[in-house]
């Protein structure tokens, strides 16, 4: 006869008590696993939201960055370089220079080792009368960006206008009811409308953009330009204009330089602010996640021990009922000379089996609950995501120990009974 | 030193209860149980018979006096030593059989193995159960046996432990005449074969099988 064999036979004999004890252990195991699962699902979901938010923010910031690059063309740390001797009051008055300079200047600048300027746009601008339409327009010849010889190629900010094509400001194409593809005569030359710009509320609305060479021909200023637009200047200090002037004067002496628009700073600040706002939003989300997790952890910290103690008490009570049921058996065992230790072992082996059975039942029922109620309570996460094999094994190993601890007192009490007292009262 | 298997000298044992205060269950009792003895301990209910039996069985420590079993005082042994001593020397039979309900006949008799005597008792058990007419019941649970069969299983368990002394408390109390007779015959056989039996009984017929009669009244032996 072996203690384990007797314990198994007793379990088979008193099935209800055994099943109730197993259920107590299973409840404790399930509460622990499910509480952990809830925390895990919240954590996983928040991580996913944050990761998604970060991707969205990154994409948004990248798009903002691109927009900014383009906006900076007109607003940024951009400068105009005007010909030597140009009266700047005239520029401020008319919006363009009356003097011209050789187009080679821009090539000279592009081939220099200048570091503060990223994009170079030579232009020829002049207010002219559009005789065919009887209206005054601003004609701008552009040839697109001139590549900087000592730099890696950069994405152009302005696309050149091909020969034979023009781009029209809003007021022009709107008033003349022109659309892309239409043919129109300008200064006795036929052009195709390539682009119709939206309303900008500036002189751009009465501007015609065309290829620089054609513009030079039409205005009879071959090889001449009246401004170089230098875009996205990299300046280390606040006094950026002075920095650029210093560098440019060495290459194009005598030229006049002005900064185009101070809104650039505000834009940059806005961009920084947008970036900071996004970062703040993510930080808030993370902080909310941490707060929610802390709240759930504190709830679990209270609930799990409470359920654990209740289960412990339940197992203790059921073991006590079991020992009371078996007191006559205990009296006999002691009377025939079976040692107290063996009787204690008999009850503890039973508790071990209860713990093992309850632990397995708890793991299985938790997996079942997560599977069935995953959509409602566990944010659609799977059993594999919320219940690791390690956790399940720990539960299955820990529960027998837990059950043995819970039943120790009644088992010890049974093993220390006075057999004479039991037999005399029997 | 005495050669008696159990030597009881001046045994006194009292109980305290809230209802009636101190009750003197056994008073200054002397008794010897020798090899080959079959003593029937008789007397009215509450006269102290069972208390004397338990004290003789190393189960109930006396207030005064001495109990020597095979020359040793079991109450001077530690609890584990006393358990081992009991397992080695004493067999018990009770009125309510005390069979373990979830163990078969064979397993109930083999229980004394757990007491750790270390002896191989399987052959002895098989022979004894055959002698007691229980061969066909080996795999039956106690609930599937008649009361007579249950008491025979209890008796087999007591004898199979290898004990030389059987202490029986009302062993025929729940049995019909026929089954009671069979049990008493087995006990008498046990005594004749070199063992010793101390039996508490109310049954007048039981006395016919005992070799000696001891009458108790109010915790005292009045006739041996």
Image: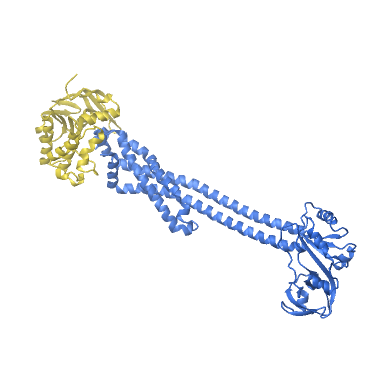
Chain colours: A blue, B yellow
Camera-nearest residue between A180 and A119: A119
Image point 74% across, 59% down: which residue? A267
Residue A392 relative to residue A220: left or right? left
| Residue A209 to residue B44: above or below | below
The image quadrant that residue A194 belongs to is: bottom right
Where does the image place residue B88, in percent across and percent down from the top left?
22, 30
Where does the image place residue A348, in percent across and percent down from the top left?
34, 39
Camera-nearest residue between A174 and B41: A174
Quadrant in the picture for the C terminus of chain A:
top left
Where does the image place residue B126, in percent across and percent down from the top left?
16, 39
The image quadrant that residue A98 belongs to is: bottom right
Camera-nearest residue between B74 and A269: A269
Residue B162 relative to residue A417: left or right? left
From where the camera sits, is residue B51 visible?
Answer: no
| Residue B190 to residue A308: above or below | above
Q: Residue furthest left?
A: B208
Residue B129 relative to residue A334: left or right? left
From where the camera sits, is residue A363 visible?
Answer: yes
| Residue A286 to residue A341: above or below | below
The image quadrant that residue A169 belongs to is: bottom right
Image point 28% across, 41% down: which residue? A326
Where does the image place residue A294, in percent across and percent down from the top left?
55, 48
Quadrant in the picture for the N terminus of chain A:
top left
How many numbered badges does the structure rendering display?
0
Camera-nearest residue between B43 and B152: B152
């Amino acid at each position: 006869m072996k203690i384990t064999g007797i314990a198994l036979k007793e379990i088979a004999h008193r099935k209800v008590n055994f099943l109730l004890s197993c259920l107590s252990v299973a409840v404790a195991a399930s509460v622990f696993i499910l509480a952990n699962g809830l925390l895990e699902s919240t954590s996983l979901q928040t991580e996913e939201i944050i990761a998604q938010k970060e991707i969205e923010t990154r994409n948004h910031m990248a798009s903002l960055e691109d927009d900014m690059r383009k906006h900076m063309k007109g607003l940024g740390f951009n400068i105009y370089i005007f010909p030597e001797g140009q009266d700047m009051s005239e520029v401020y008055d008319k919006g363009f220079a009356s003097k011209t300079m050789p187009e080679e200047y821009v090539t000279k600048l592009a081939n220099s080792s200048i570091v503060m300027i990223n994009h170079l746009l030579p232009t020829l601008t002049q207010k002219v009368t559009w005789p065919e339409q009887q209206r005054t327009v601003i004609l701008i010849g552009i040839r697109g960006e001139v590549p900087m010889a000592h730099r890696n190629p950069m994405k152009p900010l302005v696309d050149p206008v091909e020969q034979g094509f023009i781009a029209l400001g809003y007021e022009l194409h709107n008033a003349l009811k022109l659309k892309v593809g239409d043919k129109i005569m300008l200064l006795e030359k036929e052009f195709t409308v390539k682009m119709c710009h939206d309303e900008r509320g500036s002189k751009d609305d009465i501007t015609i953009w065309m290829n620089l060479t054609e513009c030079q021909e039409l205005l009879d200023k071959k090889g001449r330009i009246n401004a170089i637009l230098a875009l996205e200047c990299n300046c280390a200090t606040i006094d950026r204009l002075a920095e650029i002037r210093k560098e440019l004067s060495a290459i194009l002496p005598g030229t006049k330089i002005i900064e185009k628009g101070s809104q650039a700073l505000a834009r940059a600040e806005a961009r920084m602010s947008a970036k900071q706002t996004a970062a703040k939003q993510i930080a808030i989300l993370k902080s909310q996640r941490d707060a929610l997790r802390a709240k759930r952890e504190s709830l679990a910290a209270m609930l799990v021990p409470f359920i654990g103690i209740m289960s412990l008490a339940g197992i203790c009570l059921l073991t006590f009922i079991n020992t009371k049921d078996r007191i006559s058996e205990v009296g006999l065992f002691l009377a025939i000379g079976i040692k107290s230790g063996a009787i204690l072992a008999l009850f503890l082996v039973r508790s071990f089996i209860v713990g093992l059975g309850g632990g397995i039942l708890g793991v299985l029922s938790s997996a079942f609950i997560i599977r069935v109620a995953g959509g409602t309570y566990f944010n659609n996460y799977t059993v594999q995501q919320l219940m690791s094999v390690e956790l399940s094994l720990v539960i299955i190993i820990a529960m027998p120990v837990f059950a043995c601890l819970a039943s120790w007192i009644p088992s010890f009490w049974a093993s220390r009974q006075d057999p004479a007292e039991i037999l005399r009262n029997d | 030193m005495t050669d008696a298997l159990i030597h009881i000298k001046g045994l006194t044992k009292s109980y305290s209860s809230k209802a009636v205060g101190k009750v003197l269950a056994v008073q200054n009792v002397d008794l010897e149980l020798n090899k080959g003895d079959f003593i029937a301990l008789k007397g009215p209910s509450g006269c102290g018979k069972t208390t004397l039996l338990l004290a003789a069985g190393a189960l109930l420590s006396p207030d005064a006096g001495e109990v020597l079993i095979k020359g040793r005082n079991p109450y001077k042994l530690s609890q584990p030593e006393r358990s081992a001593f009991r397992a080695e020397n004493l067999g018990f039979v009770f009125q309510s059989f005390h069979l373990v309900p979830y163990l078969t006949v064979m397993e109930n008799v083999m229980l004394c193995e757990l007491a750790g005597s270390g002896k191989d008792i399987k052959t002895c058990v098989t022979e004894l159960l055959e002698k007691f007419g229980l061969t066909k019941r080996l795999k039956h649970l106690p609930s599937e046996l008649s009361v007579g069969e249950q008491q025979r299983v209890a008796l087999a368990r007591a004898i199979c432990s290898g004990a030389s002394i059987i202490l029986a408390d009302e062993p025929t109390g729940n049995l019909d005449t026929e089954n009671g007779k069979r049990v008493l015959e087995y006990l008498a056989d046990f005594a004749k074969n070199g063992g010793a039996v101390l039996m508490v009984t109310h049954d007048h017929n039981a006395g016919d099988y005992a070799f000696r009669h001891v009458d108790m009244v109010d915790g005292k032996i009045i006739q041996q």
